[in-house]
Amino acid sequence: MTKLTEDLELCPACRKGCLMAAQYTRAFELKGKHVEVQLQTSVCDACGETTTKASQHRENLRALAERKTHYGNVLMGEEILALRKHYGLTQQQASTIFGKGKIAFSRYESETSYPDESTTLLLTLAIEKAEVMKCLADKAGVELPLWPERCEDDRGVKLRLIQGARVPAMTMRQQTMQPDFSPGPFASNMLLGPVRPIIFPVASNDSVDLPEVVVS
Ligand SMILES: [Zn+2]
């Protein structure tokens, strides 16, 4: 750990020492590739206890998310964790759904090991499509605790889509009209034309939980 500058904040553990900003490296051994991420924390100059402040934690999450550029198709631990949390599953339930051993998800989420190619494909499909997750869970006989909530989200998105689709189209056309222009029956038809729905991807990953950064 590299000690940087003193920021004179009192240590919440001993209430005697001051917190010093510090940096450490978290390394990922990614299928033959070594990826390092620099992370921020604070260390007490009296008791040596480490404390990661909220601002440091946010910065760490950003730095961790940036490592995705090295991953290609490989899923990061956070992405697998987010999928599991999205449906309210335990690690063991998630492992059962994907036909893996009891501790598989714990290993995937901490990136102690990475899912094989076929599991990566299944996980990616399940992240992209809720129906895939539901089918896999049904086949494995595992209930998805948050399935009703995820269906609610889905309905909410569709409803907003229907409401939103016509309004921007109309506003845009009105803005292109000349101020003294009064359209006749044909002109107004031509101007409005058929309203095409705008299709956005349905958010399947909106409550992303990120892992706690464990300082070792
Ligand atoms: Zn202390």
Image (cartoon, rainbow, N blue to C red):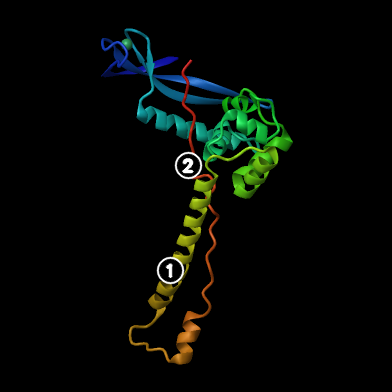
Q: Is mark 1 within 8 Å of ligand 1?
A: no
Cα separation, mark 2 vs mark 1, equals 28 Å
Q: Crowding at label 1, few (<14), some or many (≥20) Cα neighbours within 10 Å?
A: few
Is 54 situated above or below 166? Answer: above
Q: Is residue 80 above or below residue 155?
A: above
Give coordinates of residue 4: x percent, y percent. 37, 18
The outermost residue toward the top is 46
Q: Earlier in the sequence, mark 2 or mark 1?
A: 1
Instruction: Provide the residue designation for mark 1.
Output: 168
Residue at the spot 52% in from the left edge and 47% down from the top edge: 148
Image-quadrant location for residue 171: bottom left
- How many C-alpha atoms fall within 10 Å of the one at disc 2: few (<14), some, or many (≥20)? few
Give the quadrant of the N terminus: top left
Taking 195 as reference, is 59 above or below it? above
Q: Amino acid at mark 1?
A: Pro
Quadrant of ligand 1 in image: top left
Identified at 43% across, 74% down, the residue is 170
Mark 2 lies on residue: 207
